[in-house]
Image: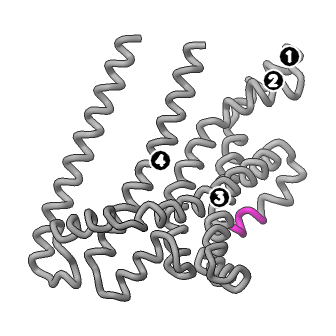
């Protein structure tokens, strides 16, 4: 156990070092290129950091972050729930699969901007369109992830369960769901990354509140440094949310091994 924990800590430390090195390289290149162009085109790292500090100190900072987070969470939770159920039904019932699987792939192939345009017509410009775009675009990704999980389940385990007279419920609970856990996690991480992009795009195009609206305001006022600063906030929040999911899975696995 100690050896396992030590190896995990070493991997985490190496991962942190790699991140620091990557960020350092990006900052160096950014600084060099910013010396060539006007701050209106590419503000320097220092100017951007100064704007970032100013933004964080503003009274409405946490309010705007909260608005975007609420829209993101509502959209993703809906997509996660509906997508998981659809993927599960498709995976477990071949008749339903023949009907729903083509529809899921058609839904995935539709460009997000088309959904965004329709959402603005249907829901207006009060933020509901943003929730809809996050939900409708990420839903097929979760459904496909769960479906792929079903297609890669070891059939020998199911056959073994039948040999030992496992009930259908017990096969689902003890064989199928544990086999889908990795695919659910992968789908969820993809959903979070894509969800952040979609929620910001939706707010830029259709909302007067949230982080996307702040980016729009910076663009209209030609405050490129603020646009970059808000971009850093969004990148950090996206990275943090993905790490929280990753940590949550590790915690569940750790508790599962103990019990």
Q: Residue at x 60, y 74 (%)?
A: 112
Check contact, mark 1 vs mark 2: CB within 8 A.
yes
Q: The N terminus lies in which quarter of the figure?
A: top left
**Which of disc 3 and disc 2 is earlier in sequence?**
3
Q: Nearer the viewer, residue 171 or 78?
A: 78
Q: Magenta residues: mostly which secondary structure?
A: helix
* Residue that label 1 marks: 163
Quarter-of-image position of residue 29: bottom left
Place of residue 115 in the rendered image (x, y in percent of width and height, measured from the top left): 66, 77
User: Residue 242 got which mark?
Assistant: 4
Q: Is residue 252 above or below residue 110?
A: above
Q: In this view, does 108 lie above or below 121?
A: above
Around disc 1, counting alpha carbons within 10 Å, would you say few (fewer than 14), some (14 to 19), or many (20 or more)? few
Which contiguous range is marked in magenta? 103-107
Around disc 2, counting alpha carbons within 10 Å, would you say few (fewer than 14), some (14 to 19), or many (20 or more)? few
**Which of disc 2 and disc 4 is earlier in sequence?**
2
Instruction: Determine the CA span between mark 4 and mark 1.
Output: 40 Å
């Amino acid at each position: 156990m100690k050896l396992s924990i030590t190896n995990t800590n070493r991997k985490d430390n190496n991962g942190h070092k790699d991140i620091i090195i990557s960020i350092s390289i990006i900052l160096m290149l950014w600084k060099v290129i910013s010396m060539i162009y006007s701050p209106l085109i590419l503000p320097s790292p220092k100017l951007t950091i100064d704007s970032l500090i100013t933004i964080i100190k503003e009274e409405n900072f946490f309010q705007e972050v909260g608005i975007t987070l609420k829209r993101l969470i509502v959209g993703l939770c809906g997509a996660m729930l509906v997508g998981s159920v659809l993927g599960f039904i498709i995976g477990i019932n071949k008749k339903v699969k023949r009907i729903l699987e083509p529809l899921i792939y058609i839904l995935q192939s539709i460009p997000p901007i088309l959904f965004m345009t329709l959402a603005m017509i249907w829901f207006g410009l009060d933020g509901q369109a943003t929730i809809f775009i996050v939900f409708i675009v990420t839903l097929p990704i979760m459904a496909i992830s769960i479906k792929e999980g079903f297609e890669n389940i070891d059939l020998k385990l199911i056959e073994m369960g039948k040999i030992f007279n496992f009930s259908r419920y017990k096969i689902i609970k003890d064989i199928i769901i544990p086999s889908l856990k990795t695919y659910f996690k992968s789908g969820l991480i993809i959903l979070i990354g894509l969800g952040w992009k979609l929620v910001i795009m939706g707010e830029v195009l259709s909302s007067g509140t949230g982080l996307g609206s702040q980016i729009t305001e910076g663009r209209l006022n030609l405050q490129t440094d603020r646009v970059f600063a808000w971009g850093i906030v969004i990148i950090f929040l996206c990275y943090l949310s993905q790490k929280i999911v990753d940590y949550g899975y590790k915690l569940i696995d750790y508790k599962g091994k103990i019990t």
